[in-house]
Each structure stands twice: as C-alpha cells, then as structure tokens.
Amino acid sequence: MTMMKAAVFVEPGRIELADKPIPPVGPNDALVRITTTTICGTDVHILKGEYPVAPGLTIGHEPVGIIEKLGSNVQGYQEGQRVIAGAICPSFTSYACQDGHPAQDGGCACHGYKPMGGWRFGNTIDGTQAEYVLVPDAQANLAPVPDGLTDEQVLMCPDIMSTGFAGAEAANIKIGDIVAVFAQGPIGLCATAGARLRGASLIIAVDGVDERLAIARRLGADVTLNFRKVDVVDEILKLTGGRGVDASIEALGLQSTFEHALRVLKPGGTLSSLGVYSGDLTIPLGAFHAGLGDNRIVTSLCPGGKERMRRLLNVVASGRVDLGALVTHEYTLDKIVDAYDLFSHQRDGVLKVAIKPF
Amino acid sequence: MTMMKAAVFVEPGRIELADKPIPPVGPNDALVRITTTTICGTDVHILKGEYPVAPGLTIGHEPVGIIEKLGSNVQGYQEGQRVIAGAICPSFTSYACQDGHPAQDGGCACHGYKPMGGWRFGNTIDGTQAEYVLVPDAQANLAPVPDGLTDEQVLMCPDIMSTGFAGAEAANIKIGDIVAVFAQGPIGLCATAGARLRGASLIIAVDGVDERLAIARRLGADVTLNFRKVDVVDEILKLTGGRGVDASIEALGLQSTFEHALRVLKPGGTLSSLGVYSGDLTIPLGAFHAGLGDNRIVTSLCPGGKERMRRLLNVVASGRVDLGALVTHEYTLDKIVDAYDLFSHQRDGVLKVAIKPF
Amino acid sequence: MTMMKAAVFVEPGRIELADKPIPPVGPNDALVRITTTTICGTDVHILKGEYPVAPGLTIGHEPVGIIEKLGSNVQGYQEGQRVIAGAICPSFTSYACQDGHPAQDGGCACHGYKPMGGWRFGNTIDGTQAEYVLVPDAQANLAPVPDGLTDEQVLMCPDIMSTGFAGAEAANIKIGDIVAVFAQGPIGLCATAGARLRGASLIIAVDGVDERLAIARRLGADVTLNFRKVDVVDEILKLTGGRGVDASIEALGLQSTFEHALRVLKPGGTLSSLGVYSGDLTIPLGAFHAGLGDNRIVTSLCPGGKERMRRLLNVVASGRVDLGALVTHEYTLDKIVDAYDLFSHQRDGVLKVAIKPF
Amino acid sequence: MTMMKAAVFVEPGRIELADKPIPPVGPNDALVRITTTTICGTDVHILKGEYPVAPGLTIGHEPVGIIEKLGSNVQGYQEGQRVIAGAICPSFTSYACQDGHPAQDGGCACHGYKPMGGWRFGNTIDGTQAEYVLVPDAQANLAPVPDGLTDEQVLMCPDIMSTGFAGAEAANIKIGDIVAVFAQGPIGLCATAGARLRGASLIIAVDGVDERLAIARRLGADVTLNFRKVDVVDEILKLTGGRGVDASIEALGLQSTFEHALRVLKPGGTLSSLGVYSGDLTIPLGAFHAGLGDNRIVTSLCPGGKERMRRLLNVVASGRVDLGALVTHEYTLDKIVDAYDLFSHQRDGVLKVAIKPF
C-alpha cells in the first residue's frame, strides 16, 4: 500500500478528502498511523481562508497513533508503539529553541526566530487528518502513551490541554490567587482546569453558553458568569471586593474579552492571553493605569515536544484532570467534511470531534 | 521657626512659592530638611493640569536632605543624618506591599490595591520642593547617604535611576542579549545604563536629539539611532540580521515609541514599558503575531523603599554608573518658577535641574 | 482585669501556667484575646531546653483570637474582630523585609538580616499560649478570619500550613511533576497538600506511621511508602523508572531524610528542605553528582504577614484543603502541662492539639 | 589523508599523542578541523586517573576550528566556516534537554536524565586535543565565530566563560548586590567577570595567589582578599558591616571554599557552586541556620549549545569582557605532553594553555 486518504485544503471554503502518497521516511523522521485526530478552531480559520495555507496541504495538528516506521537515526522507540506528538513540533536544535522559545522555532539557517515556526503540522507540512502523518525531528517529538489510556483521553494533550495549561502557567498563579478565565471553549476550559492545578483558590469562569459554564464548574471553576446575563466586569469587581483578580486569562481572541480581562485585573496582576486575534487590539488607558500599574500582558502559543506531552499524559494518567466531556462527537475520516460542517457552525453543543480514520 | 517656603500647585498653569507651616511629626514620621531636590516630567504634567492634584499641595518627589526630627517609633537613625527617600514611599505594611507590589500600595483598610498608591510625595501628600518634607512610614523609607557622595550624585536615585533600572530589570535581560531603548531622556538614559548593568551585549539607543544620544553612548549604548534621520525599525532589524531584539524598553509614553518597541521585538521577547501614556494604546496585529508570539509586555512604576535606595546608592558609590551629566542646571528654591519654565520648555539642553532651598 | 494566665518557660523540662500582667498597647500594636492556639514541635524543643529562650517568656506562636484593643496607628480593623496572625510576624519595614526575606527580618537599625528574625512570638517576645497576646506591627500582621470558618479550620494557617505550602512552593513544582515528601507529620502533610495544589501529578509520601500515610493519601499523595517496611530510595527509583523525582521535600530535619531526599532527586531537580536540623549535615558526593548535577537545595522558614494569611484563609474557605483531621486533641489552657506531656511524647496518635483558654 | 594526531588517555599518569583514523561523518555530524584547543582542570583529573575514561579516548572539550565536512542533515553552515562548539554538546532532543537541563542530557531511550550526560567530548566520545573532532548533533552545537575575533579571544567560550558566567547567573544577582567569589582560577575569574556583568556593585574576589587577584581586579573585582594573609570570613563580614553577602560563588571544589562561601552568606542569600568536589561535603549547622535561613545552594554544569555560544561570542565581540590575559602559554599539539606537565603542576603562573595542532 503506498497511497492514503487525507483531508486537504483546496481553496477557501473547501477542505476535501483526497488520495495522497504515503510519504517516505528520512533519517530523523517517523511515520505514524493515525488512530484518532480532531479538528481545531484554527482549522476552521484555514477552511474559511482566514489563515492561508498552500492548496493541497493536509490539515490537522493533533495526532494520536501508532509508529509505523522509524527513521534510521531515531532511537528509543519501537514500531508498533502508541504515541502522540504535540501540535507544535519544533526541531529543538535551533537558536530559538535553545533560547527557551521552541514554539517560535526559527529553523537552522540563521540566528533568528520565526513567529509560530514550531507549528508545522497542517501549516507548513502535511498534517494529521489523514491515515498517516510524517513526524519530523521524531526523536524530539514522539511521546509514548501510557498503557490503559484511551485515544479519547489523550486526544486533548497535543493542543487544547497544552495551550490551556500554558495560559495558567504564564499567568504566574500562586496559591490562594483569584483568577478569571474569559471564554470557556475547549481551550478556556483547559485554562480553568490549569488554574485549579496551579493552586488558585477562587476561579471565575466567564462564557455566554450555560452548558460550557457547567463543564467549567466540573473542571474547577468556583463561580461562573454568563456575560449575556450579567455585566462581568462589575460582577468580578464585586466578587473581589473591588480588589480585582490576581490573574486573568483570555481564551478567545476578541477585543471585548481582552478588554474585560484587563479591566478586572489588579495593579501588579498578569493578563495571560491565549486567543488568536484577527485585528489590532486597543489597550484602554484607564485599565492600563496609564502604563504605571506594574502589570504584565503575556501571550502563549501551545508548548510542544515530547517532554511536555509526557507531563500532560501523566496528568491524565493520574486522574488529576478528566477531559472526557470535551469530546462530544465522533466521525470517521471519510465523513470529515460533515465533521467540519458541524464544528464550524458549532451545532449540537459540539466542543471537540474525534476523527477516526477507519 | 515654624514656617517654610514651598512650591505649591495653585491652578493649571501656576505653581508658585508659598509660605506653609512646617508639619508636626507623628510617631512613624520623619521631618527632613531638603538640601537638594529636582523637577520631574510628571511635575510638568501637574503644572499643565494634565495630572490633577489638590490646589495648595506642595509638588516634588525627589528628596535629598538631612533628618531634622524623628518620630517616636522610628529607630536606627539619628537627627542630623544625611538621607534620601524614594519618590515612591509605600507603607510596606499593606496587602499589596506584602504581595510584592509596594508601588501599588492599597493602604491599610482593605484587601486591595490602589494604582500608583505608593506615590505620595507631591501627589497625595505634600512633596519635596520645599524647605522641609514630612516622610511617612519613615522606618521603611529613609536611606542614609554614604559618606563622600554629593547631593548631585545621589539626586537621581529616588526616581530617575530607580525607574530606568526597573525598566531594564523587568525586561528580563540575560547575558549576551540585544536590547533597544526608545527615548533617551533622563529615564531612558538610566534604562540604557541599566541594560548595560544587566549584561546586554548590544544596546541600541534611540532618540531625536544627538546630544542625548551622545550621553547614551557614555552610559552604555553600543549603537545610537536618531529617529529623525533613519527609519529605526528598519535599522534595528538590519542591525540584528532580521532577528529582532531580545528586549525593548519604552521610555517616553507615546504610541509611536510603544509601537516601534513592539515591531523590533523577536517572538519570545519582552517589551518593558516605562512611559506614562496619555491615551489608549493600539497593539498592531502583525507586530503582536496575532497573540501567538510568546511575547510579554510589562509595565513598571518606580520602585521605592529604603532597601531599593540602599542598592542604588551602592551602585553610585562603587562608581558603576555616573549620572553626573544628567544634572545640567541649578536653581535656588526661590527661583523655582523660572526652573519650571526652563524645564517645561526643554530649553538650553536641560536634562535635570538641581533645586537648592538655600 | 489586668492579669492573665500564660504558659511560661521556667527552665529546661518545665513550662508552667503563670499569672502575668496583660501588656499595655503601643501605637503600632494590637492586643488579641486568644480563643484557640496550639503547641508546635518547636515548643517541645524549647521545653526540653534544646532551643534556648529567656526564663519567664510566654511560649506559643499560633494565634486565633479576637481583637481586644488596637494601637492608635493601626487602621482598618475593629475591636471585636476575629483574626489570626502568622507565627512569623515581621515588621515588613526592615531592609531584609523589603529585600524579599521578611522571615529573616533584621530589624530597623542596620542594613542587615537576623536569621529567623521575623519569628518573635514565644521566641523573643511573649507568645500565644495565654489569654492575651500583644501583636507588634499589627497593621502588617493581623488577618481577619472570613465568616463561617471555625477556629479549628484556621488554626493551621499561622504556621503548619504556611510552612508546608512553602516547602512545595520553594520546590519549584511544575504541572506534571513527580514529587516525594519525606516525613508526614503536620508540616509534611501540608507539604503533600501543597504539592497537590501546585500541580504535581505523582506525589509519593514517606513516613514510618501508617496512620499518617493514610492522612497523606487523603491530602493528595498518590503513593505512600512506610520506610520501616521498604527501602524508600530503591522504591522511588523503581516507581520513576530510574529517573528520580523532579522535586523532593524534606519535612523532618534528620540526616537520613535529607539524604534520602537527595538520593531520589533527578539531576536538575530541587530539594526543598523544611526541617529544623540539630547537627551538621553531610552531602554525599555521589548523590550530589560531585557538584555538577544542576541541583538546588532550598530552605524555607514559615512565611508570615497578613497577605500570606489572607491567601491561606482563602484556600481554607474555598474548601481546597481540609486540615480538620490534623487537630486530634483539645485541652483548656489550665491543662496545658498535660497537653505538652501528650504532645511531646507523641502519644495517642496526636498530630496537633487545640488549646482553648476558657 | 585518513589519519590524524590525537592526545589519548593511555592509563593513569599517561596521556600520549597517537595516530587515529579521521572519523566518518554521519548525517547529523560535522567534522571540524581544530585550529586551537586547550587543557582543562578536568583533563588533569583524567590524566591522574581521578576521573575514569576509556583507554584510547581522545581528551579535550574546548574546540575552535573550521568545518571540514558537514553531515547530510546539517543545514545553515558551510564547509570552511570558522566555528566553536560548547564543551557540553547535548542532543537537545531528549526529555532532560526539553525540561531545561541540557547538560544532564539523558539521551533518547528513556524518560530520564544522565548526570553530566551532555558532556561528551573527551568523556564519552573522542575529544578536541587532536587535528580533527567529530561534533555530534552538529545542527544544535556549531556556533560560527564572528569575523575579526582571534582563536585566543574565543577559546574560553566553550567551557571556562560559559561555566564562570553560569555561576553568576545561578547566583540570582540583582543590581546593587554584594557578591563574593571564592577561588580565582580561570573559572573563578570568569565568575567574577560574570558577577560584574549582572550588576553586582561590590565584588569581593578571594584567592591565595596575588597574581590571580590582580587579574580579578581587571575583570571586575572591587576588593581582593588573599586567604593566606587574612581570615576571609572575618574580613568579608567586616566589609559588609556584619550583613553578609547577597550571593557567594564557589569556584574550586573544596570543603573549605564551600564552607567559607556559606559562612559569609546572608540569610536569604544564594550559594552558587561551580567546583568539582572529590569527597562528601559538610554543611555546618550554624552557617546553615539549622535549615531555617531561607538559603539556596545551587550547582551548575557548564551550559552548552549554539545559542549559548552565540551569546558568549557576542559578549567577546562587544568588548564587554576581555579574557586575553587568561591564555598565558602556547604549545603545538605535538608538545602536548609538555603542556600537560606545565599545566598539571601549575608552573610559571599558567592560567590557560593554547594548543595549536600545526
């Protein structure tokens, strides 16, 4: 067998299933047979043409699968082993990687950084919505799945969980902190779970959909606020006695969520931003204390690499966080166009869709 | 003697010398006889009515002087001792202070923070442009001046040096870093000196006045750029081989300097902002990498307290940094209206003005 | 009423109840009527004469009570308010405090530090095992107790919980970490709970008493090891596949626990030490990788101050951690000699004893 | 030409020049023709048999040279380019590397760490005291030398400078700090220079050789103490008014230097240890404040990788630090046995010896 099915970007508005050759395996690569993958909000931006990729590219960046073939230099793994790889799969050899910014991997040839350069699957190389995916720099990126965990249990590790937790980690949360998380989609829910994991003692989750707020409560929120029903800035200031929150996490990418996150923040506090913005942002002078508030605004792209995946898999294996509730639908790869339709229109309470190639 | 001369805010456009009673000394206070003080850019905002303070308030927040009288609870000092105190003189007992944000001192009565609450001299209580100033929470704020240092040598410690260095400290500079500092007024010059002190190996100083750039070179800049002559963003990207800087420091408070500081920043880098802004800020989408660049934007208000002052005095005493060149003019207190006139119009190459009460 | 009952140190082997005058209240003090206090392991060292204090000193450093009288400068509190104060109650105005080390408060008169200088109650000033205690620097140290919490629920905040959590905080725990905690007395149990709060995904608790290990499981341990039954170093290396733990916490103060904590530590890992040692320590060359293992050994004294207490009270109020199980016995103040007898001999499964003055 | 000269370890007491085949170049390797290398104190330990390596191994880990041949996967370099590589040359793909501890590189096959695993040259693979060296994981480890720098100027970057600076970096130095550096051999001298680069305002250098103390002054020390002439602990406590130093750096590896470094340290301070110890260490109870002093003891192995080298090369290129004075002697490779003799007996004021293959 030399051909495989893959979901490829054709043109804005069209992602279709196509036949592609199974790629050859170079010395530092691994070929992974996908057993489960999923669709990300970013993929919908690609579908709509809002984020440009090359026509013909296979989409998707969240792989769960089995090693089919290892490159000659890749050691410590076996063919047949169950693995995941991060959505962001850097080389780990570049200047940017060694400088602590692997997600901004600048590649090999210069002293530099490439914004989001660590994101390759479904962006600059073929992705995971296919029967097989070629993992580059496999030595640095393949993470074995512990026995006893299902594909669904680990499906959030490559992107959603890594990103959401990163939002909590970058927020510099201390034991006893008050944290507000704006938007409770999959990433915001993981940020809520992450804030709980870091020791926040009062977590306020904000969204416009009550079902999502209910999941937020199960994942660690103490208080939930529906922005369609209350003025969230007023409410949070009231809840904190006018003090504001120690950290706020933005998990959507809108001016309104960014601005709310800033307006509820104490002087000295951190705004941790995870959203993908689609226009210039405005920082209101007052909420920014004219630049004198000792505040921090921090952005994070999903951390990748096998060590990050290993840690997240440990969190799942230990039962600390159960993201099962996030996988609301399942499709086979041949129905992926339907899955995109459901997911992009956010129908039927969808949070995440499991895609099974067979 | 029970009365003293003091420069008070009368109304927008008018700061005048007035007679005021020398204040009584409470148990936690110290009365300091001013030997030298100075005028800050913030004071000019007050003069113009752009930053509101109560009519009748004594202006100024940069004291060098001699302890005239100590409160009954203040220990470890002697009357007659030469001291300085930080422009920001927090209580150090409030929740915000103990949480690591003394400049945002929320006072005693709640769990909270007050933006810039640590700034009291010439803002919420009488300031230093007078013959005497009352230092509250003196135990926490009086710092003895080492023998052998002149008033002029230590005059920058309370504000300019503490703020400028804080810009470098918040920029998270590592040995070998490339740092750009935008604006070379007194604070920007100290940020340049601070970047050098933290181990940056290439420091690029930007301003529109060649005289200031010349001082920047003396204080540690390797390269200087006059924004009136070159496109500084292009030039810095060229100087760094397209890589961008590890950290950029904004030291003025304009959209343009903020934006330049962001545009030259590598993904993963830190923008350390010191400026006092006067309007909403815009974050350009591209320079912000749509929120995915692992960047940090950090703001700092001048750190205060006697431990901070002690460290800065040590830096001066050791000869590491010589800010003598910053004091370009000297006036007596009775001529302070003239000094404001010179300083607010930035005439005669003025950087900082020493004010001597006698 | 001008006299009160207090447990005072008489001589090695003797702590007795005595009559003492209720102290006068200075401008920065507060007089607190104790409603519950407890006995600490340190108090037993004092009783045995192993830690010297002045004869006649009132012992105890863990206060829960009601404000009886406030000094003239103490603002934002009311008489009659329920409060706690940290076991360590620093001035927060000294150089050491402003330098980030309030527990090593050097006092006012010099540039320096005094080891453990922030610990005053029952050490350098009269303590809490009495009907009343005078809280110095009350503005910085009094923390109101939220409504609805019992004395027993907050009794661990001043010392045990603050210290145990500090052990986890200093261990630099990251999400997904493996952490081992050596000794599960009250402080070790709180370190275990603290490791859980910080996001460790595998927590290994070690002790020689199965009842304590059972409590450790309830507070967050995933695996418990009784050192009387297994070789804990072997077992932990086995559990981690030879990798070692990311962080180990020592919570007793013996060469053996310190050494075990080092032997199970990965290169690059942190040993967080809480124990009070009674002799020189030996660092074995091999476990220390001859000084080339990129390891950190960190010691922590109990953090104090009202902001720390506020955060710990929030953790209790939110239900994140329930330390009720630690208070195993209750005595009235007039029976405190019996309580010392029980506690110092560790009879009847005692963990902590609540002392009620009335 | 297929053979080369190399200095190999024969047996304890014997390192000799031998003929060896020039190694073949794998896909991730680079073959570098050495132009200058040097002898390290560690090499002397190997010579004496105190640190065991395989007989026949080529010694040396400090390469300056020219790329002779690149592996098929190594991109962004050209044959003929001048480069250095760190003494520690990790894979950067292992779990330990991605966890922030590349020097403890655990290799590929497990979740683990190998103490000093990143050190390969002259330890687990053939080293640099030869005509050619094979650099593994070349993409991650080759750093181009900026034009205009001599071999001698960059010869310290791979080990001495990286290690010494790491000692200062791990010491957590802040602007205005007081730092003591114990031992002024090549690494201690670089620690002194590093402390200066990080902003220490009073640097106290300790050694027993006045010539080294004179160099320490040139590299940044403010005060030098000869331990043969004064009691350094007393003297440092006197110099700091009894306060102690903010950080102390141990740069030799003896109980006495370690102990002095602890005894002069303030509570809350950091002891940064660089020495290679040869026996168990004792921590004196009093100097350790019985474990309650909020102290940190941190060990560092030389950081490697091309990004680290790039930064150090920048420091050299900018003229911030001039280590020229450290290269006191020069030998050709065929006289390396003589060079070992001189260096191991520390004759003729030797600090570092340049070895030139031709």
Image: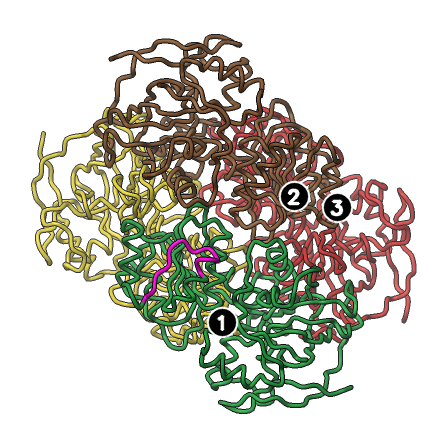
Chain colours: A green, B yellow, C brown, D red
| Residue bounds of the magenta highlight | A216-227
Where does label 1 land, which residue? Answer: A351
Measured from the top left, where is residue A133 in percent x and y? 68, 78
- Asked if the magenta segment contains residue C73, the reply would be no
Considering the numbered disc 1 on the image, is that residue within a helix, a strand or a loop? loop
Q: In the image, is A219 to the left or to the right of B338?
A: right
Residue type beneath disc 2: Val
- Tell me the quarter of the image containing the C terminus of chain D: bottom right
The percent coordinates of residue A92 (x first, y second) are 64, 66
Q: Amino acid at mark 3?
A: Lys
Q: Secondary structure at mark 2?
A: strand
Who comes first in sequence, dot 3 or dot 2?
2
The Cα atoms of the two marked residues, 1 and 2, are separated by 34 Å
Question: Viewed as shown, does residue A249 lie left or right of A325?
Answer: left
Compared with C152, B101 (above or below) is below
Q: Nearer the viewer, residue B32 or C143?
A: C143
Residue B82 at x, y percent in the picture: 29, 33
Q: Quadrant of residue A278?
A: bottom left
A180 or C321, which lies in front? C321
Q: Which is more toward the observer, B222 or B292?
A: B292
Marks 3 and 2, how far apart at CA = 13 Å
Using residue B80 as the reference point, say whether residue B240 is left or right of it: right
Q: Which mark is residue C238?
A: 3
